[in-house]
Structure formats: C-alpha cells, structure tokens
Image (spheres, rainbow, N blue to C red):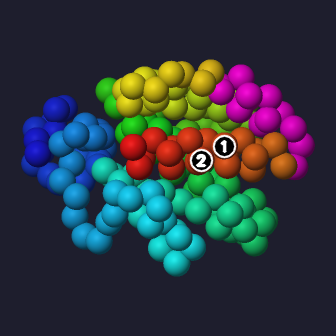
Amino acid sequence: MKCEYCGYTFNAPKCPNCGAFAPADKIEPSGNFTTDPKKITNDNYIQYYAGVKVRSILLCIVLCLITCGLYLLIWMSNLNDESNFLSREPKPTTGTPAVLYSIFTCGIYLLYWSYMQGERIDKARMIKNLPPTKMGIIYLVLILVPYIGVIVSFSLMQNEINRLAVM
C-alpha cells in the first residue's frame, strides 16, 4: 500500500519512511496469526491482529514489577501507538514522544495522555460500531492513585485495546 502522507510503498501497520499509521482495512496479514480470540493462550500471548499486538495483561504487570516500573514506559508507548492505530488518528503523537513528554513534565502530561487515551479508545469503539464507554475520566482518576493506579489504568486500557483488536 502507499502511504497517504509521503507516498512510500509498504505493508506494515506504520510507514517506515514517515511513521504515519496505515488504515486498518488496508493491512495485509503476514506470518502466523489468528483471528479467533479463543486461541489466545498463555503459550501464544502475543498475536497480531491487523497491526495490533494482543498482549497478556498479567505478563505486562509482572514485567512492570520485575523491572521496578521501567516496563511501564514501554507499555505506555505501545498503548499510545496501538490506540492511535485503532482510532485512525491522522497525525498522531507517537509513543516515544509521549513518554518523554511525561518524563519532562514530571507526570503532568501523563494526566492529559490518560484522559486522551479514553477519547481515542472511544473513537476506535465507534469505528467498530460499538458505543463509547467514556473511560477517560476513570483512567485519569486511576493515574492519581499512588503505586497501583498507573498499572490498573494501563491494564484497563490494554484490555480494551485487546478487545478492539480482535473484533
């Protein structure tokens, strides 16, 4: 397919030239993947669905605990990119700048980001003909809870992204 922004030809969820996300309906599946949500087990916890990885929430939490929270930065970046992809954002902020903005603003951008995640997930739900859940406020409030709030908020986001990816 051709990138809508730079004209580069590729077959991936993201243009390797400019970083723009491809429309979900134009990505051709490659490799070993399944569209049956019942086939997602602990043995194959990562499956690709139209460019989105379906991640095991338990594994992400364990990785966060093992790495003393450093995996949260990677998880945030992945959540950002996948929600942008599912909601078909035309010119999204990619995951790495979102993480850096959160670090440089001492977490203030994280509050804005968590609310906007809810908005992007609602937009993705509407694309899939599902009613919006208005979870942005809940994500924002959970981020404010010390110690476990971020993990619970990210887990809820990942759960919703996993559901939307397999639909």
The CA distance from mark 1 to mark 2 is: 5 Å
In this rendering, the answer to whether 97 lies above or below 88 is: below
Q: Residue at x 75, y 72 (%)?
A: 66
Identify the disc placed on residue 156: 1
Look at the numbered disc 1 and give the secondary structure of its residue: helix
Is there any visible trace of residue 18 in the rendered image?
Answer: no
Give the side of residue 142 with respect to residue 83, left or right.
Answer: right
Q: Residue at x 60, y 24 (%)?
A: 133
Q: Amino acid at mark 2?
A: Asn
In terms of image quadrants, where is residue 11? bottom left
The x and y percentages for residue 166 are 41, 49
Q: Quadrant of the N terminus?
A: top left
Which residue in the structure is indicated by mark 2? 159
The x and y percentages for residue 14 are 29, 47
Is there any visible trace of residue 129 in the rendered image?
Answer: yes
User: The magenta stretch spans which residues?
Assistant: 135-147
Question: Which one is in front, 72 or 49?
Answer: 49
Q: Amino acid at mark 1?
A: Leu
Q: Find the residue positioned furthest to the front.
A: 38
Give the side of residue 60 with respect to residue 24, left or right.
Answer: right
